[in-house]
Image (cartoon, grey):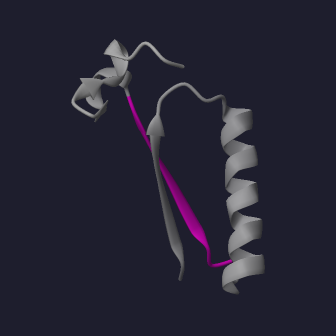
Amino acid sequence: MPFVEIHMWQGRSIEQKRNLVAAINAAMVEHAGANAENLQIAIQEYPLENWARAGILGIDRTEK
């Protein structure tokens, strides 16, 4: 049973998440030979204040 785990900042719409998991599902079937019926995908979302890169919290970053 393949399991894909996605970690990302909060803020995507339900439609964006639907499109994302459909694309990942298709890619896993095409490129990894996964059985679509057994493939599981989990999305873990983080508030900007709970994620940092290069020592700077996401909420404090200025670039988009």
Residue 36 in the image, given as x and y percentages of width and height: 72, 76
Residue 42 in the image, given as x and y percentages of width and height: 50, 56
Q: Nearer the viewer, residue 59 or 62?
A: 62
Check the image and name the residue furthest to the left.
55
Residue depicted at x 48% and y 17%: 63
State which quadrant residue 23 falls in.
bottom right
Say above or below: 25 vs 16: below
Looking at the rendered structure, the number of numbered marks drawn on it comes to: 0
Residue depicted at x 74% and y 35%: 15
**Side of 23 relative to 44 (left or right):** right
Say above or below: 28 vs 50: below
Q: Which residues are magenta?
A: 36-46
Is residue 36 in sight in this rendering? no
Q: Nearer the viewer, residue 23 or 15?
A: 23
Task: Please say whether residue 39 is one of the residues in the magenta stretch.
Answer: yes
Is residue 5 in sight in this rendering? yes
Residue depicted at x 27% and y 34%: 54
Say above or below: 4 vs 31: above
Helix, strand or loop: magenta stretch: strand
